[in-house]
Amino acid sequence: MPDFSDQVKTPPPTQVELTGMVADRFRVLARLGAGGMGEVYRAQDTKLERTIALKRMAWREGITPAARELFLREGRRASALNHANIAAIYDVIEDQGDVLLVMEYVEGSTLRAELGAPMPLDRFFPIAIQCADALIAAHARGILHGDVKPENIMLKPDGQVKLLDFGVARQLGGGDAFSATATVRTLLGPGVLAGTPVYMAPEVLRGETPGLGADIFALGIVFYEMLGSRHPFKGANITVTTAQILSDQEAVVLDQNKVKVPPRLSSIIARALAKNPARRYASAQELKSDLEAVRDGGRPAKVSRTPHAAGARIGIAAGLAALILIVALATIPGVRSKGLAWWQSRRPGATRGPAPRLAVLPPQIAGSSPELTAFADGLSAAVAAKLSTLTQNHDIQVIDSSRVERARNAAPDQALKELGANMTLQFVVQQSQAMNRVTYTLASAKNAQVMSEQTLTAPVDDPFTLQDRVADGVIQSLRITLLPEEAAALSVHGTTQPAAYDYYLEGKGYLSDIKRPGNIPNALQVVDRALQLDPSFGRAFAERGEAEWYDYIGTHQTDWVRKAKADCNQAIALGNAGADGHMCLGLVDAGTGNYQEAAGEYQKAIELDPTNARAVVGLASSYARLNRLADAENVYKQAVAANPNSSYVREQLGIFYLQQADYGRAAQMFQQAVQLAPESYNNYSNLGGTYLYMGKYPEAIRALEDSVRLHPTGGAYANLGTAYYQARRFADAARDYQEAVQNDSGDPDLWGDLADAYQRSGQKSKAQDAFRRQLTLVNRQLQVNPRDAERQSDAAGIYAALGDKSDALGHLAQSLNLGRGNKDLIFNAAVVYNDLGEKGDALEWLQKAFTAGYSASIVRDSPEFDNLRNDPQFQQLLNRALSK
């Protein structure tokens, strides 16, 4: 195993060895070792009667009183650290001109002793994760260790890791001349680097003020040595080694050195070793999360749709990012009534087997009053929501009317079959003078045979009674015996003002179809009236917050975001909104990039309403955004296990697998979804998109044609366009992309797809116009969520296509920094550099994309790299990826 001890200076001979002497109150027992920064002794604290480690800092000519004072101050700051994986610094003292660090004495051996051969993974992960934990603790206090290396990592016999020697640590932040603005060099005199040069990040070697990423780079070198048994930049001497660190050439990935390291782990280490700090892990916590994900069989970072390149077209239907999924479901307030009963265990003794699936049909209105229509829609949604709360303890699932309506629009004759319903609930609402009359009918979905029917009447100004009586009647017809707590929960309305509740129901009805012109403004108007009547109506605040967020989605006017968040917070503060307030805030947090906060809100919503499917999907999506992939997958797997006859949950798990580049399992989930719901156009579109990723173009075309036949959606047309694009039938691709854009002119990805097809088919002017239209839409979204890595990547690709290199690289750097190893973003970096004419960088990022799991089949068939088809380096790179 290479050792770099010959590459650092030993302490000057002018310092007398301390063994046998007494320094301050410490009796020095033995010299343990020495390095470039000083000597370490085992000593006895005569006052506290304990063994400690004593480090005497190496003497340096030219140390000024100010530098000595700085060192003492930084050492005392480091002594504030208290963590299981950090060897404590007890004190920093001066004795007869020497500066001494009083440290915890740790029994065991240094990591260097175990680096003679590649380390097994079951040994590597516990050590690596504990090292990351140590940096997390230090960095949380703003402390940069500054000398991470194997000699400073102690392994105790019980497996505990201790990070040693914060002797050159320094506090980042603050404004005095010896903290944030001071470079490492000022600690020990001019021209002297504090630390070990061959473990220093490039920015440190260049004399720049380091950030916390310098420790991550050093730890990346350590990880590389643990798995590869060699330094990633090892040269003949220290000069050559540091020169290689300073060069633009990244470290050779481990799996190219014939070392048995999984590609996912290699990609983690490659990111930690990125020469550019902006491309490195932003925090030790991110590094630890990726290590844990790969250890548990997951991937090192979230994966979502591919921007700009072929994968973007594939992702229109199947690979929409988690945020888009949340928004899509959130537009249908009643989706939570899907009734996922798996969140908590079912009541002991409950009937097993397929649960009754009750489809709440859109209500029928006697008359043409818009207000009565909205009231009826709201009443239907409210009753469906009440019934859905029973799924926690009873074998019933509820499909709300908004989902039924969408299914009917797609395939009118097959809607209920596609949804898997076996029962229907239909409302007929009439109004006569001062009375509302509701007739509900419970029937078989198979043959429309009526199972129960009842007509109920209540005053117009008493919506409480009407809603409660309808819900009670349906429950009795279904022969469900309520638990006491369920009966109490069903009687809660959130307000004592009937008129306020009436307006609330009306607003809920408008929001059940937010795409209908005028519905969002109408919802805001009636909810405003509800709040005028009852300013403490928490659910109304939550409803208004969601309406304001949807108004932002439709108009992109950022003022709506501020209003939405204020109303969501007010709903929570009032304490009577139940899960609705947290759902509202989770929606806004996720939409503005605050995924950790969104996960917390969705979790709180689930605690208040375990049957809330919107919260479940929101939580899983937030986990994916936070790179907690194992947690996200577990959420979806539980849903599949608890709903064996549900195509919907398999679709969601398939989308998750697709985002993780696990194409085989994604295709398996979509195939099962198709079998369970053969009339679902969306499942065919998802399956076709997955086949595109796998390079199975005939299968993709067949599935996508089935999807278009059932219902010609923009997503299916976009994916079909991609099939033609991959086949280099660019005019046909442009035709289908035009269909997709007509379906949704506000989707920037569709405009990018169309622009690519125009450009490849020789329609340059149309391509430029489409790129500019895409850029406008992307920039609007970035104004609200600048941390959206995918949209930053989109912007980079557009600017590259328009020939603006500076803006392209600026957005690309932000994307890669935010994306945490996302394979699609890495691939797009290769596309951007290729569009800019930078072949070397393009090939380098293409290699990284393959390492991260990007589909070699897509690259093989994609026109994006046609200009490199005859390039030997490109051919070698692609053939190696295809052979894996």
Image (cartoon, rainbow, N blue to C red):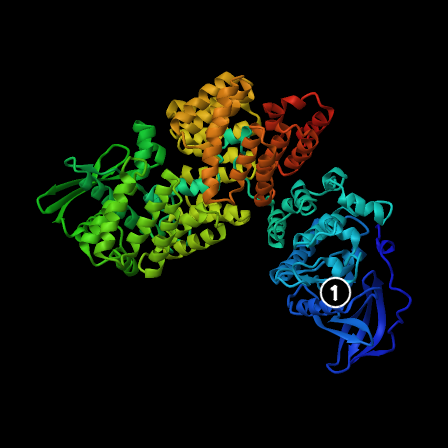
The C terminus: image quadrant: top right
Of 682 and 588, nearer the camera is: 588
The percent position of residue 74, horizontal first and vertical second, equals 69, 66
Left or right of 282, for residue 784: left
The percent position of residue 118, horizontal first and vertical second, equals 77, 48
Indicate whether 432 appears above or below 113. Answer: above
Q: Quadrant of residue 244?
A: top right
**Residue 669 appears in the picture as rendered:** yes
Indicate whether 770 appears above or below 405. Answer: above
Indicate whether 860 appears above or below 221. Answer: above
Q: Quadrant of residue 675?
A: top left
Left or right of 352, for residue 460: left
Residue at x 25%, y 54% (from the top left corner): 531
Left or right of 256, for residue 544: left
Q: Which residue is denoted by mark 1 in the rendering?
A: 167
Of 24 and 377, nearer the camera is: 24
Residue at x 69%, y 69% (from the top left corner): 73
